[in-house]
Amino acid sequence: MDTAIDFIYLSEPDMIAAGVTDMAACVDTMHEMFKLLYAGDYRMAGPNSDSHGAMITFPDPPPFPTMPLNTPDRRLMAMPAYLGGSFGTFGVKWYGSNVANRERGLPRSILMFMLSDVDTGAPLALMSANLLSAYRTGAVPGVGARLLARPDARTVGVAGPGVMARTTLEAFLATCPNIDTVKVKGRGRASMNKFIAWVRQNHPRITTITEVDTFEEAVRDSDLITFCTTTVPDDPSTYPLIKREWVKPGALLSMPAGLEIDEGLQAPDVRKVVDNIGVFDAWAAEEGYPTHNLVPIIGCKFTDMIHDGKMTRDELVDLGAVAAGAQIGRRNDDEIVIFGIGGLPVEDVAWGTTLYRTARAKGIGTPLNLWQSPAMA
């Protein structure tokens, strides 16, 4: 009996060689994943098998001198999932985040992903996951744009010109062929310059890039709107606010970060879609009501609205149902659609599995041995 277990290590350069930055392929992979979500061929953590993950939190102030400070966006988190269909794997992303990393020249978050064989649990690959996570995160708004945006969308309004904005814009460009204009609001000169330089270098079809000073200017006259700002929980009055009077008929608001909406955008004629209703149910169970106070993303606002009787559960649309053809997304050309994105561990499994198979086929990565035979069995 052969008991040896080998797996591969994929560094960030290996991930690039395997195609992690191929946004069109990533969008297609996420689209397939959403169909599996609708079919129920997946599992995530938590009692309802839909949890975003397990996160370690820290008291404020810390009771021990070596304990990390409870600073904004401090995360130590594990995000496990199984995905069936053509994927048939499970994995876990380990998520370490500290906003002070930027002062060290490091990304705010440093991520790793372990992909495992679903039968034995043996490792298949340990991979660098910053780009994996960034591209799967951006690809989800791309699926949303494919299914929910007007086909003639041309103008994108962006707030928060960081990595998430870059990959989201890239996914919009992969799915909306008429985009040629970007309006961008940022807080710092450095991030704005970096974003604009990236757009000009990588996406010459964008003929107009306009810097704006307010959220309202970013929203007005935009066909696609995405807010990718960092938001501190606990007080929705401090979250970025969008008013209905700013939003043009037919616009898609694709929101992977914190947000507040006014009463006009809460109205029933505004279509409300989320990436997975179950993950927002899990947050509501884990955090209590009002969930939006602790988890700033807009899907938690929707579950709070259901709790308050401001909308029915039937009015909340799951993107997987739209991807599978079981529900329509946009009901007419003038409808405003809000797409709330929570982020799902199954996305990492889907894109990680795809890249692992490409790496194996191309001989990319460093082979590692777990054991030739286990010392204890």
Image (cartoon, helix red, strand yellow):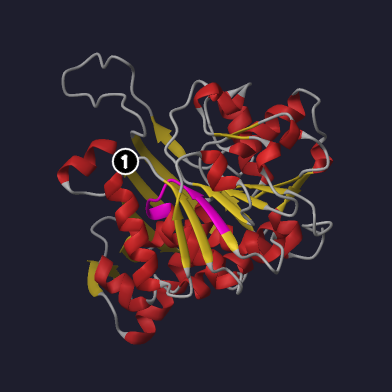
- Residue occupying the point 23% across, 36% down: 100
Does residue 377 appear left or right of residue 140 in this picture?
A: left
Q: Looking at the rendering, which quadrant does residue 127 occupy?
A: bottom left
Q: Indicate whether 76 appears above or below 95.
A: above
Residue 7 seen in render? no
Q: Nearer the viewer, residue 249 or 372?
A: 249
- Disc 1, SS: strand
Q: Residues within 10 Å of mark 1 (few under 14, many from 20)?
A: some
Residue matched to label 1: 97
Dividing the picture into quarters, in which one does residue 67 lie? Answer: top left
Q: Position of residue 173 (x, y in %)?
A: 53, 69
| Along the viewing direction, whichever of 151 and 121 lies nearer the viewer | 151
Q: Position of residue 25 (x, y in %)?
A: 51, 75
Residue lying at 79% horizontally and 65% vertically, measured from the top left = 325
Q: Say which residue appears at 69% left-offset and 32% top-offset.
A: 303
Query: Residue at point 43% right, 77% down?
Result: 357
State yes or no: residue 161 in magenta. yes
Relative to 196, 12 lies left or right? left
Asked if residue 37 is positioned above or below residue 1 in the image, the reply reads above
136 and 44: which is toward the camera: 136
- Residue 109 percent location from the top left of the image: 31, 46
Dot 1 amino acid type: Ser
Please give the range of residues in magenta: 156-164
Count of numbered badges drawn on the protein: 1
* Quadrant where the image shows the C terminus: bottom left
354 drawn magenta: no
Q: Nearer the viewer, residue 357 or 305?
A: 305
**Residue 275 percent across, percent down from the top left:** 63, 51
Answer whether residue 73 is visible to the viewer in this image. Answer: yes
* Quadrant of the image containing the N terminus: bottom left
